Image: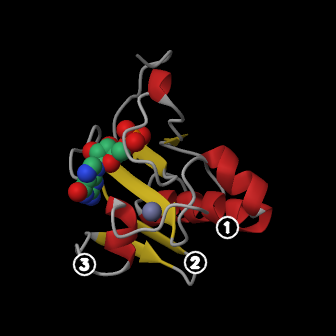
Amino acid sequence: MSEPTNECLFCRMVAGEIPPDVVRETDRTLAFRDINPQAPTHVLVIPKEHHATLGALVGADPELTAELVAAAHAVAVQEGLVTADVPEPGYRVVANTGPQAGQTVHHVHLHVLGGRGLGWPPG
Ligand code: 5GP
Ligand code: ZN
Protein backbone atom coordinates (compact mmCIF):
# COMPACT_ATOMS: atom_id res chain seq x y z
CA MET A 1 0.00 0.00 0.00
CA SER A 2 2.08 2.99 1.22
CA GLU A 3 2.23 6.13 -0.88
CA PRO A 4 -1.14 7.71 -1.02
CA THR A 5 -2.21 9.00 -3.49
CA ASN A 6 -2.79 12.61 -4.30
CA GLU A 7 0.52 12.42 -6.15
CA CYS A 8 -0.26 9.15 -7.91
CA LEU A 9 -1.76 9.56 -11.38
CA PHE A 10 -3.80 6.35 -11.22
CA CYS A 11 -5.07 7.08 -7.69
CA ARG A 12 -6.25 10.43 -9.00
CA MET A 13 -8.14 8.59 -11.73
CA VAL A 14 -9.73 6.29 -9.16
CA ALA A 15 -10.72 9.38 -7.16
CA GLY A 16 -12.31 10.91 -10.26
CA GLU A 17 -9.97 13.90 -10.33
CA ILE A 18 -8.76 12.91 -13.79
CA PRO A 19 -11.46 11.10 -15.74
CA PRO A 20 -10.14 8.03 -17.54
CA ASP A 21 -11.78 6.38 -20.55
CA VAL A 22 -13.25 3.51 -18.53
CA VAL A 23 -13.97 0.20 -20.21
CA ARG A 24 -14.77 -1.89 -17.14
CA GLU A 25 -15.12 -1.39 -13.41
CA THR A 26 -15.64 -3.61 -10.37
CA ASP A 27 -15.70 -2.81 -6.66
CA ARG A 28 -11.95 -3.18 -6.46
CA THR A 29 -10.62 -2.78 -10.02
CA LEU A 30 -10.74 -0.22 -12.81
CA ALA A 31 -9.87 -0.70 -16.50
CA PHE A 32 -9.33 2.22 -18.86
CA ARG A 33 -7.76 2.90 -22.25
CA ASP A 34 -4.06 3.76 -22.38
CA ILE A 35 -3.49 7.36 -23.45
CA ASN A 36 -0.72 6.23 -25.83
CA PRO A 37 -2.00 2.95 -27.26
CA GLN A 38 0.51 0.47 -28.63
CA ALA A 39 -2.11 -1.77 -30.24
CA PRO A 40 -5.75 -1.43 -31.38
CA THR A 41 -6.75 -2.63 -27.92
CA HIS A 42 -4.52 -1.25 -25.16
CA VAL A 43 -6.26 -1.17 -21.80
CA LEU A 44 -4.72 -0.68 -18.36
CA VAL A 45 -6.24 -2.65 -15.48
CA ILE A 46 -5.52 -1.44 -11.95
CA PRO A 47 -6.57 -2.19 -8.40
CA LYS A 48 -8.34 0.84 -6.95
CA GLU A 49 -6.09 0.51 -3.91
CA HIS A 50 -2.59 1.85 -4.29
CA HIS A 51 0.18 -0.76 -4.55
CA ALA A 52 3.36 0.26 -6.32
CA THR A 53 4.29 -2.99 -8.04
CA LEU A 54 2.95 -6.44 -8.80
CA GLY A 55 5.16 -7.85 -6.06
CA ALA A 56 3.82 -5.38 -3.53
CA LEU A 57 0.27 -6.31 -4.47
CA VAL A 58 0.95 -10.05 -4.29
CA GLY A 59 2.49 -9.63 -0.85
CA ALA A 60 -0.31 -7.46 0.49
CA ASP A 61 -3.40 -9.04 -1.05
CA PRO A 62 -3.30 -12.27 -3.08
CA GLU A 63 -7.07 -12.22 -3.48
CA LEU A 64 -6.98 -8.79 -5.09
CA THR A 65 -4.15 -10.01 -7.33
CA ALA A 66 -6.41 -12.77 -8.57
CA GLU A 67 -9.22 -10.28 -9.11
CA LEU A 68 -6.87 -8.12 -11.15
CA VAL A 69 -5.92 -11.01 -13.43
CA ALA A 70 -9.57 -11.97 -13.80
CA ALA A 71 -10.40 -8.37 -14.67
CA ALA A 72 -7.70 -8.33 -17.37
CA HIS A 73 -9.15 -11.47 -18.92
CA ALA A 74 -12.67 -10.04 -18.74
CA VAL A 75 -11.48 -6.95 -20.61
CA ALA A 76 -10.01 -9.19 -23.32
CA VAL A 77 -13.36 -10.98 -23.67
CA GLN A 78 -15.22 -7.68 -23.72
CA GLU A 79 -12.88 -6.36 -26.43
CA GLY A 80 -13.50 -9.44 -28.59
CA LEU A 81 -9.94 -10.75 -28.30
CA VAL A 82 -11.05 -14.17 -27.02
CA THR A 83 -14.30 -15.94 -26.27
CA ALA A 84 -15.17 -18.25 -23.39
CA ASP A 85 -14.24 -21.23 -25.58
CA VAL A 86 -11.66 -20.05 -28.07
CA PRO A 87 -8.44 -18.18 -27.24
CA GLU A 88 -8.42 -16.38 -30.59
CA PRO A 89 -7.40 -14.01 -32.01
CA GLY A 90 -5.66 -13.59 -28.64
CA TYR A 91 -4.18 -11.01 -26.35
CA ARG A 92 -1.17 -10.29 -24.17
CA VAL A 93 -1.01 -9.19 -20.53
CA VAL A 94 2.07 -7.25 -19.43
CA ALA A 95 3.12 -5.98 -16.00
CA ASN A 96 6.25 -3.88 -16.27
CA THR A 97 8.13 -3.88 -12.97
CA GLY A 98 11.12 -1.67 -12.28
CA PRO A 99 13.36 0.47 -14.48
CA GLN A 100 14.70 -2.24 -16.76
CA ALA A 101 11.18 -3.23 -17.72
CA GLY A 102 10.24 0.41 -18.22
CA GLN A 103 7.72 0.89 -15.42
CA THR A 104 6.83 4.58 -15.46
CA VAL A 105 3.69 4.71 -13.30
CA HIS A 106 4.24 3.35 -9.81
CA HIS A 107 0.73 2.07 -9.22
CA VAL A 108 0.54 -1.54 -10.33
CA HIS A 109 -1.23 -2.03 -13.66
CA LEU A 110 -1.73 -4.81 -16.17
CA HIS A 111 -1.53 -3.83 -19.82
CA VAL A 112 -4.03 -5.77 -21.96
CA LEU A 113 -2.85 -5.63 -25.57
CA GLY A 114 -4.43 -7.06 -28.69
CA GLY A 115 -5.97 -6.48 -32.07
CA ARG A 116 -2.76 -7.00 -34.05
CA GLY A 117 0.03 -9.55 -34.24
CA LEU A 118 2.36 -9.02 -31.28
CA GLY A 119 6.04 -9.74 -31.77
CA TRP A 120 8.06 -11.99 -29.47
CA PRO A 121 10.41 -11.43 -27.77
CA PRO A 122 9.27 -7.95 -26.80
CA GLY A 123 11.74 -5.07 -27.09
P1 5GP B 1 4.27 1.48 -17.62
O1 5GP B 1 5.32 2.10 -18.52
O2 5GP B 1 4.40 2.01 -16.20
O3 5GP B 1 4.20 -0.01 -17.69
O4 5GP B 1 2.88 1.97 -18.20
C1 5GP B 1 2.32 3.20 -17.92
C2 5GP B 1 1.28 3.43 -18.98
O5 5GP B 1 0.44 4.50 -18.56
C3 5GP B 1 1.87 3.84 -20.33
O6 5GP B 1 1.47 2.90 -21.33
C4 5GP B 1 1.28 5.22 -20.58
O7 5GP B 1 0.95 5.45 -21.93
C5 5GP B 1 0.07 5.24 -19.69
N1 5GP B 1 -0.30 6.56 -19.23
C6 5GP B 1 0.53 7.53 -18.77
N2 5GP B 1 -0.18 8.64 -18.44
C7 5GP B 1 -1.48 8.34 -18.70
C8 5GP B 1 -2.70 9.09 -18.57
O8 5GP B 1 -2.72 10.25 -18.14
N3 5GP B 1 -3.86 8.47 -18.96
C9 5GP B 1 -3.85 7.18 -19.43
N4 5GP B 1 -5.05 6.67 -19.77
N5 5GP B 1 -2.74 6.45 -19.56
C10 5GP B 1 -1.56 7.02 -19.21
ZN1 ZN C 1 -1.83 4.99 -6.80
Whether residues under marks 3 and 2 lie with C-beta atoms below 8 angstroms apart, the answer is no
Q: Which residue is mark 2?
A: 28
Question: Where the C terminus falls, by quadrant?
Answer: top left
Within 10 angstroms of label 3, few (less than 14), some, or many (20 or more) residues? few
Left/right placement of residue 34 relative to residue 30 reads left
| Residue 101 visible | yes
Q: Is residue 57 above or below residue 88?
A: below
Q: Is 85 displayed left or right of 62 in the figure?
A: left
Q: Nearer the viewer, residue 30 or 5?
A: 5
Q: Which residue matches tag 3?
A: 17
Tell me the residue that label 1 is attached to.
Answer: 67
For the N terminus, give its image quadrant: bottom right
Find numbered disc 2 in the image and state the secondary structure of the residue it sits on: loop
Ligand 2 quadrant assignment:
bottom left
The amino acid on which the numbered mark 1 sits, given as a three-letter code, is Glu
- Residue at image position (43%, 36%) is 103
Spatial CA span between label 1 and label 3: 24 Å
Identify the residue at image location x=25%, y=78%.
17
- Mark 1: give few (<14), some (14-19) or many (20+) Cα within 10 Å: some
Looking at the picture, tell me which residue is in the foreground, 57 or 85. Answer: 57
Q: Position of residue 52 (x, y in %)?
A: 54, 51
At 58% from the left and 77% from the top, the residue drawn is 28
Query: Depth-wise, is mark 1 or mark 2 nearer the camera?
Result: 2
Residue 121 in the image, given as x and y percentages of width and height: 50, 15
- 2 over 49 or under it: above or below: above
Name the residue located 45 percent from the left edge and 66 percent from the top edge.
Answer: 78
Q: Amino acid at mark 2?
A: Arg
Q: Is residue 114 visible?
A: no
Q: Are marks 1 and 2 in contact (CB under 8 Å)?
A: yes
- Per the image, label 3 sits on a secondary structure element best described as loop
